[in-house]
Image (cartoon, rainbow, N blue to C red):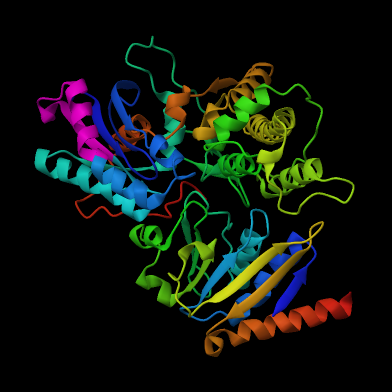
Amino acid sequence: MVVQTQSADETRALGSALAAAARPGDRLALIGPLGAGKTQLAKGFAVGLGITDTVNSPSFTLMAEYRGRLPLFHQDLYRLSGASEAFDGGLLDERQDQGVTLTEWGDRLDGGLGVGRLDVRFELLPDDARRIELASADLDRYAPYLEIAAGWEARARGAG
Amino acid sequence: MSGRILAVESSCDETAVAVVERGRRIVTGIVASQVALHAETGGIVPEVAARAHLRWMIPVLDEACARADIADWSDLDAIAVTNGPGLAGSLLVGITMASTLAWVHGLPLVPVNHLEGHIYAAWLLDAEEPERPAPEFPVVALVVSGGHTFLVEMRDHLTYRLLGQTVDDAAGEAFDKVGRLLGLPYPGGPSIMRAAAGATRRDRRFPRAWLGDTDDFSFSGLKTAARRAVSAELGGPDGGPIEPDGSLLPEPVVAELAWAFQDSVVDVLATKTLGAAERCDARTIVIGGGVAANTVLRQRIADAAASRGIAVAVPRPGLCTDNAAMIGAAGWHRFNAGERAGRDLDARPSLKLAV
């Protein structure tokens, strides 16, 4: 499923919409270059979960935790080079089964997240536009996200 | 009662132990800098950091004890330790050692927030440094590092009111990421400062995110502006690559872009800090955190504050980055306020300073 957003505001709105599908144990890998909108999508997702705290980039702090409709674990592997570092650093723990985990630079986990995840891939387009692709090998769990994205894209095209 | 506190810090990438007297005078401060280790990997690698904490903690403690001439532990009033925020695994190395020392030697254990440590670094005096007055309240403190960017008001010791914070990237993170975009070596802060100092063209203007008249900060748009500028410089008539490689740029252009980026960050940090200080009737502006080592930022705030009759307290660069002396300084005030932790003291990765 491919979605396009035209601005950071729209990327946040998409994140907020996707949060409606969130269930305990969900893991989203946010993948894409610097400034592609990974943190913006996470910020919107947090709003969608009813989180009122300011969500900012955990690039240096590596993981931040928030309380909302579900606990949100917001991770950033920008400074990591492989899965073993994330495991040894304690970035994956059993509490995440009770909440939703968003992992920026999630591709650096290699197979560490397992196939039970939703990949959200960001590509830079000219100006502020972004191409955002959602894909998962576990459709039983993640189909609701794809449906929300499809509806969102249809509305965006209709409006455009 | 010697007024001496032994302090331990291991929240992120530095393993550090210090002995501080009455919250101000550094008797000794040892930091096992892991920067060299990280430079090889292009960033701070937490797994490497956690292992390095384990490897360094005891040697750093031994060195601090030898230099402070601690033969009799009853000369100490307490043990202070950072209990958050930070990585749980890293924090636990320091907490475990500090609580063990406190238990074995029958000393009080005092937990300290890493972020208040960065503020209290401004109270510190080096071993041979002449006395100078402590910062006077009310204080407006700007903490700027790789992981944090915020402004707080302090009307007295240990009381913090959050004025504003970054809504996306921390300032130090922006330095690091734009440094990478420009093809400059890690860490980005000193690299950009050095490159900018050599800029001959100083008229390019990157955007500033003022966020209305709030005390909040935003640096992610600046990251995008920097990427576009690099792309435009590389691109011909058909436009540059969407994901440009700044290491292909000629040195004068890198210097020009580094200058423009730093100018924008410093402008926003200084303007907002001065505005908050005036509004709070602050007598002192305190700056802390790794980005406070940036000489352009220090000078800009010092000049602007001087013209308004506000004092500025900034630690020397070595005390802006993570260290244990700052934990000893803040720990002294927490100790005097009667704060004690039990042996069950746990790491609090998301510990907040103020709301």
- Dividing the image into 4 quarters, which one contains the N terminus of chain A? bottom right
- Dividing the image into 4 quarters, which one contains the C terminus of chain A? bottom right
Q: Is residue A77 visible?
A: yes
Write the residue at 81% across / 44% down: B232
Write the residue at 67% across / 65% down: A122
Looking at the picture, tell me which residue is in the foreground, A125 or B20. Answer: A125
Q: Residue furthest bottom?
A: A140
Residue B16 higher or lower than A154, as above or below:
above
A123 part of magenta stretch? no
B78 part of magenta stretch? yes
**Majority SS type along the magenta span:** helix
- For the record, the magenta segment spans B56-80
Residue B198 location (% of width, % of height) = 68, 21
Residue B286 location (% of width, % of height) = 53, 28
Write the residue at 44% across / 76% down: A114
Looking at the picture, tell me which residue is in the foreground, A29 or A93. Answer: A29
Left or right, B81 with respect to A80, comes to: left
Residue B100 higher or lower than A34, as above or below:
above
Residue A9 higher or lower than A140, as above or below:
above
Left or right, B39 with respect to B94, comes to: right
Looking at the picture, tell me which residue is in the foreground, B175 or B306. Answer: B175
Residue A106 location (% of width, % of height) = 52, 65
Q: Quadrant of residue B203?
A: top right
Q: Is residue B139 visible?
A: no
Residue A104 higher or lower than B329, as above or below:
below
Total marks placed: 0
